[in-house]
Each structure stands twice: as structure tokens, then as C-alpha cells.
Amino acid sequence: MDFNLKKRARHDVKVEVISLEAKYPHNVMLYHYPPTEDIHIDEFEDLALERLRLLRVFDRATTKGLRIFSDDWKEYVNAEMTKDGLRGYLRMGMPSSGTKHEADVQMRRRDYLSHFILRLAYCRSEDLQRWFVAREMEFFKYKFAALSTAEIKMFLDANNFQIHPLTEEQKDEVKDGLYESTVGQSVSKIELLEFYKVPFTQVLDLVRTRRCYIKAGFAYVNTHDMVSIVGAKQLEEIELGMQAAKAFIADVEADERIARMIKSLHNSYTGKDYTVCRDESVPIESLDQLSKTSMPLCMRMCHEHIRSQHHIKHGGRMQYGLFLKGIGVTLEDSLRFWREEFTKKMDVDKFTRSYEYNIYHNYGKKGSMVNYTPYSCLKIIKEMAAPGDCHGCPYKTMDPTSLKAKLSAYGLSAGGIDEVMHFVSRNHYQFACGKYFMLTHNSTVEPTINHPNKYFEESQILMGNRQKRAPGPAPANNKLRTAIKGGANRSMLTGDDDDELWRIAETQEKVYQSQKGIAEAFDDDLDLTEIIE
Amino acid sequence: MPELNAEQETQPQATTESKAPAYDPNILPDMLPVYYRRLFPHEPFYRWLNYGHSEDNIFVNREISFTLQDDIYIRYLCFETQAELEKEICTRNPYKIDIGPVMNIRPKNFRSVAGGLTPVQRELVFDIDATDYDDIRNCCSGAEMCLKCWKFMMLAAKVLDVALREDFGFEHMLWIFSGRRGIHCWVCDHTARHLDARARAAVAEYLNILTYTNNVARVQIGDRTHHSLRRALKIVEPMFEEIILEDQNLFGSPKGVSKLLQMVSDEAARSNLEAYLQKSHEDGAHSKLIWESFVRYANSMRTSAANVWSRKLKHIVEEVQLCLLYPRLDINVTKGFNHLLKAPFCIHPATGKVCIPFSASAVGKFDPTTVPTISQLLQEINAYDDKTKSYMDAPEDKSRIKDYKKTSMFKGVVVFEEFLRKLERNFKTKSMDF
């Protein structure tokens, strides 16, 4: 993709002549040629965030442990897409009705462009890339599954797939193997199906799960499993594309507006906004009780740490302080809460000098005047907790023995602990948290936990203390935009000079904190340069 | 030439049987220099890793690592020539030599090159360790290994070898006894060496059928039996009685019976079966009786009516057999492109035994308990030297026969040479094609 607006201008005229229909002839395309049109930065960002929401739907489906393409999986994905306002993408996964709509063609364009935008954001590290490729492949298969036989044929022709079905004689030679080892088809169907012979390296997913017949390095794939062959090609295409993207990422990042966005994209929070609690206020007197009933483990541990140690390191103050703001603790209460605890170990003067600023700052009353967003699970899981810290996601940071002891101390039965640990051992921390929620609330519905404040809210709703709010669109979207435009209403994205103020305020705290801890302290929610590693 | 070799092979074995010296780990550092200078097959070893120089830098970019005394570990070594490798081995006398992947650059330059090392090719490797069979071995445990244990390894090698040949079309498998309790397989075909990480993972998972839930190993065959499992069953089934029921008498104790029960995944079916077995047998009944009852019960349940035994558990008998005797792979070794694996012909520091190649087709005849130790080998060449001294005075005469051919390590080297001969034939025909 070329971001140099001036140079491209001349070509544009030619591009415009080609109709969208000709440019994006199919719902399923191999993302081979990078798009060459110019788009407005707003659209660039819109597309990126929309696709991120899309991929996260697939991510959630995987985290839930749903088997890909099972009925549950499809149902879940479709429902989540509808909920997240992704109807356009949803339509791509439905069998086409025959009549062509302008909106569908527009959607193909969105799909195509947004894929290439996200390549830029996700070529930055191997972890990111792995996540992206896996999700993209799920989406690709999701789309491909909706194609009719005729459409598949068109697709194969359009993309130069040189694969031909076995002749009857060829099929006859291997028919015993086909009958034995073709999974998911009855014997009578296998007789009628067309089979393709491809090197086993082209259908690794079928090989891995022993779903097809393999002989002498060749896999025999039936029409229904064709998606594996095509998918392998798509995978190769994306991976090559990612390498290419990596090669010119430095040029792209010369444009700061884009650099900021793509660096922060993966961890940008696209769910509900908890920056300001709108409807409730929570008196600090109730915190002890609430910590037991409605706080997720990460916050409950912070709370108990403060109550017992009367101090908490910076990472914990950020994590817990912002959480408290999000559930509705007012600035005044917050100040009172921290002061009461901290002054048990230090004099009021020192507290005022060293810590008050942070609290004002969190509430957007000092320094950059940014009203900080409470940390999401993504952010918390990513935190590296050092010894003596109590922030971070306990399911990730605690060793299994202490975690079990903790859960048991919090009243989980041995069976319940096993259920939670089941997910912990598979690194599904959010799922473990959801299980913990179910067990502690005697709930049969498993909430999807992606934010501690969501946990709290769900808990309060379940206990009848709060009303369910209508899910609004994600305002994170808008914030990101203003930040990129560099407008006066600065958000979490722009934090550089703000960080300077932080630094000044923080120097006094060195007594309590190692150098490393301070360095970590400055990464606010969306400045996520560290994800590059 | 071969006739002469065969003759000499029998000779030293006869002498060692009379007084086989015990291996003492403390004097290993004193023995290694002699071993590396006189016995280690440097030339074939190099020929293997050079692959007929079929690709550029295939030898010189290969990562080799040495483990020296006191666990000093040197990584990222690489060598320009056979002579350099030989010299380095003979001066450092490593306790262990590991072989890593062929890298994009000389591995020793890993610090000075931007972007660092990227593996470009590597043999597809498999590692099977007898400790993974501990829960079903009654004869030994942990690092120990007897002839009964070896039968598990033998079956594993047979099943894996045929799968690699028939399903994946690989031909050049080098099978190695690791010197103590495990076996390694190096698949050296061009395609295998060039598989990417994802393909390795897929092959590993294709060949790994055991799943563990709560430390209970189970196998699920599914609706129809995949041809690879059917073939494995044909190999495993005839040995089941001998290994599991006779040698190990696995179900001969209440604990053993519970192992059998655990493999039944359906809870209700399991408790019914348990009740049935308890009713028909006393505690400690022989495995054969338990097994017969189990098979009878499963069959009659399956045929009597539509129930869980005729659906989910319809293959339970075969599943149990596979679960106990199908190769238990350490799939992480296979998946890793970067994984280092011990080179053949190393000396295992704990046992003193040579890490020696064996042939998968003759695996039944291989006996790990008689694999020579380094002490034994040194004694053998000494004995040979003494014997031949009288009529072989001139040193140049003596060097005409390779030293390892005078010892019981000879058979392993022959297997290795045979493997190399087939491998190299491949390169010759290939180069003529172009």
C-alpha cells in the first residue's frame, strides 16, 4: 500500500475508471494484490477498528473452546457479529441470494482494504502475527463455507488453482484407503464425491487431525475439504504479505498519525467505555464488602493488599485506582481512601507530596487532563508483575499452587478449583475468570470477561444492584481518531509530554520503587510500544 | 571386504564376554580422548551432515553444540571441513555432541549479523523415551531399561517407521539407540528436512494419537478406523499378549485393573465394567483372565443392544491396545525446528554406552543391554592390538583397518554406512537428472 499521497495522485484517475464490481468480483478473494487507491485517514482508521472487532469475534469463539464450524460456533459467531455491528461482514458469510447489491460490493472493498491495513499493524511481532493469521484464516474459512459449488469453481479459476479431480481409475486404485480414512463422509457418499490429490504439506490441518487418506506424501482431499487446500494458499499469501509489510513498515511509520494507530491497535479496547461511571456512585465504605462479592480476583487481591500492607506499588495503584474510578468511586472518596490507608505508614505530608497528584491525574484533573480509562483484561494480562507487586492477572502471574490456595481461601470447592485451573493450565485466563464468576455467583450463564469493570457490572446486575445498560457503540473509536488528528481533546494515545509530568511527579517515589517499575509506570493504556517485542 | 569385516566382528565379542569391564563414570574424561581419536566414525559422520553437498552451506552452516565436563555447554559451533570438525572434537573431547538445524548463516556469527539466526533446514526428528511408559512398566522405571522395556521401543520404532514410509513417502530414516532409555529417529529426506514449523507440528500430531486428560492417556479411534491406526493395530496386536499380559502382567493388581478402567471414558460404563470384573475375579487375578473378561464383556455389551458400548466405546478393545503400545512421542522435539538432538556415536555419560544406530527392520534383534560401553570398546581395541602386534608391526599397516571395525561397535557403524549408501545414491541420481 502506498501512503504517499502526492505521488499517487496521477494513478488515481485510472483506478477510478475500473468499477468496484470488477475490482472486487468475489466475496472471497485471496488478498494477493495490495490495494492502490487513496483513502482518507478517517476511513483508514474506521476500517482498521471494524476489522479488529471482527477478528475479536473469532478470537472469543476460540477462547470459548467452540470447535470451528460446529453449529455452536457458527451461531456464536453470527450472534456476536450482529451484536458488534458487523452486519456487513455477516452478510459475506451467508450464501449469496443471487441479486447483487451495491452494499455487498462496498463491503468487499471494506474487507479487502481493512485486511491490508491490519497487516501493517500485525507484522510487528511474531506473537501479533500469529494471532492475526489465525483469526484471518478463521474468517476466510467462514466466508468460503458460504460459497456455492459454482462460486467455488469461479474462485478456483480466478485464482489459478491447477487442481483436477482424480479420474475414476485413479480413484479406484486408492478406494480402500479413501473409505477408511475420509472422515465426515459416509461410504456411499465417498463413492460419489470427487477427490483431489495434493502434497500433504498443502492440507496440514487435515493431516494433523487425521481427516483424510494419506499415501506416499500425498493427501486425498474431497470437495468438502477443499477449503483446506485453498486455505493453505491463502495462509501462504498472508504470511508472505506480512513479511513484505515488515520490510516497508518503517516507511509507513514515518507518518506519525498512522504509526500511532497501528502501534496501539491490537490492544486498543473496542468494548464498552468505562472511563467515567455514569450511573452509580460507590461509597468507599462498601469496598470491603464489594471486594468479596463483585470484584474479580485481580482487583480483590489489590484491595486486600492495600488493606493489609497500607501501600501498593505504582502498577497496582494504576490498575486498582482506575478500576475504582470505573465502578463509580468519586475523586473525593478516592483521595480519602488512599490517604487513609497510606498514612498508616507515612505522614500526611509525604502522601500529599508523592501520591495525591497521581489520583488527580487519573481522574483527569491534573497534568494532561486526560480522563484515563480503566485497564482492560488484555492490558492487565500483559502486565509483568515483579515480586512484591500485586497487580497483573493472578491467573497468569501466580504459580498454580498458590493460586489454588487462594481460590480455596476464597471459598471455592475442590471441584470448582479444578474447573478454574483447567483453563489456567491452558492459558485461558479470561475463561478461568469467567468460571470463577460463575462459581462465586452461582450463575449458570458464563459471562465473557474482557474487562474487570465488566465483571463488576455483571456481578452487580446479577445481584440486583444495577440495571443493565443498553450496550452502546464503542467510544474508543472516537478517541482514537481525535488522537490521531492531534486535536486539542487529547486522549490516552498522546502521552509524551504528559509522561514528562508523570516523570516529575514520580521521581519522589523512587524510595518505593525500582527503576524498572517506574519505566513500566509510564505506559498508559494506549501507548503500547512494548507490544512490539 | 565385507567378509573380512564380518570375521573380525565376532572376534572381539568373544574376548569381551570373558571379562567385560564395568563402566566407571569417573574415568570417562580419560577414556573420551582415545574414543574420539580411534573409534568415533568421523568420516561417515561428516558424510551424513554434508548430504553429498547437495545444497550450498549445508554442512558449514549447521549448528553443532558441545557439552563439556561439568555441564559446560557451548552452542553455535560450526565447522568448515571434516578435518576441522574432527580436530575440534578430538581436542575438546565433548561429553555430548548435539546437532541443531542448518542456519541461514554461519551459526558462530550469530552475534554479528543483523536479524540473527534463522534455521533453514533440519531433519525431522522423533524422540521416544521409556520414561513415558513408566505408568505401564512393571519391570523397570525411570532411567532403567531391560529387554522387556525394549519391546515397547521396538514396537514404537516399527509403527513409526512404516508410517513415515507409507503415509509420508519418506525413505531415509536413521534410527538411534540413545545410550540409556530412549530411541531417536532422524528423517533425512529432502522434503522432511525442508518442512516448516507448521508442517512438522502437523506430522507430529498426525503420528501422535494419545491424548491426556488428567494424566490419563486415552486413544479415540472415532467412527471409522483411520488407515494409519488400522496398520498400527496390525503391528501391535500380536505383541499385546506377550508384552502387556505376560511380561508386565499389567492388570494383575487392583491398581492395574484401575488403569484399564480409566481408559473407558464413559463413567457409567466404567462402573458397570468395574462391577463385572470384581464379580468375576479375585484381586490379583492374572492379567490374561482380566483381559479376556474385559474383551468378552465389551463384545457382548456391544452386540446386545444399542448403548454406549455400541457407539462411543465400540472400538474400546482396540483403543486400549493402541493406548498401551502405540509410540508415545515427545512431540515437542518433533515440532521444534530449532531443537538440538544428541548426535549418534556419542557416549552416554551415565551408562558409558555408545549412542548407536540400529535398523528398524531388524529392531527385534537389537539388544540395548549388550550395547558396548566405552570401557568395553577400549579394552577391545587394546586386545586386538596386542593380538595382532606380532604380525602387524608397521603402524601404516594397522591403520588400514578402521579401529571401530575391531570392536563390537562395528554393527552400528555398518547400519550407519548402509543408511548413508542409500542416502547418497539419491544424490547421484538426482544430480544426473539435471
Image (cartoon, rainbow, N blue to C red):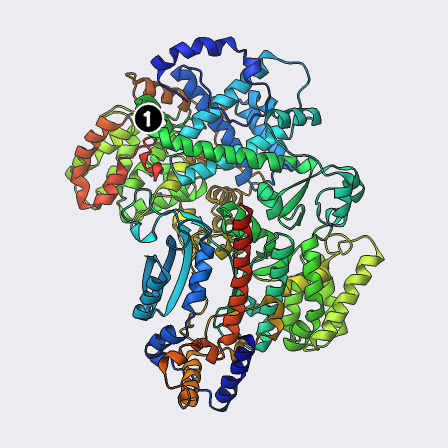
| Residue under the point 72% across and 74% down | B288
Q: Is residue B51 above or below residue A62?
A: below
Q: Secondary structure at mark 1?
A: helix
Residue B215, can we see it?
yes
Dividing the picture into quadrants, the one containing residue A368 is top left
Image height of B281 relative to A391, above or below: below
Residue at mark 1: A251
Q: Residue B143: image x %, image y %? A: 48, 73
Coordinates of residue B205 in the picture (x, y in percent)? 57, 52
Whether residue A263 can be seen here: no
- How many numbered marks does the figure carry? 1
Question: How many other residues sit within 10 Å of disc 1, few (<14), some (14-19) or many (≥20)?
Answer: few
User: On the picture, is A395 further left or further right than A143?
Assistant: left
Identify which residue, A269 or B68, lies in the foreground: B68
Chain under label 1?
A: A
| Left or right, residue B233 beside residue A200 | right
Q: Which of the pair A143/B302 is nearer the observer? A: A143
On the image, the x and y values in percent for residue A431 come to 50, 42
Callout 1 amino acid: Asp
Seen in the picture, residue A465 relative to A67 is either above or below; the reply is above
Q: Nearer the viewer, residue B280 or A494?
A: A494
Quadrant of res B252:
bottom right
Q: Percent position (x, y) of residue B158?
A: 62, 64
* Drawn side of residue B347 relative to residue A339, left or right: right
Q: Residue at x 51, y 22 (%)?
A: A112
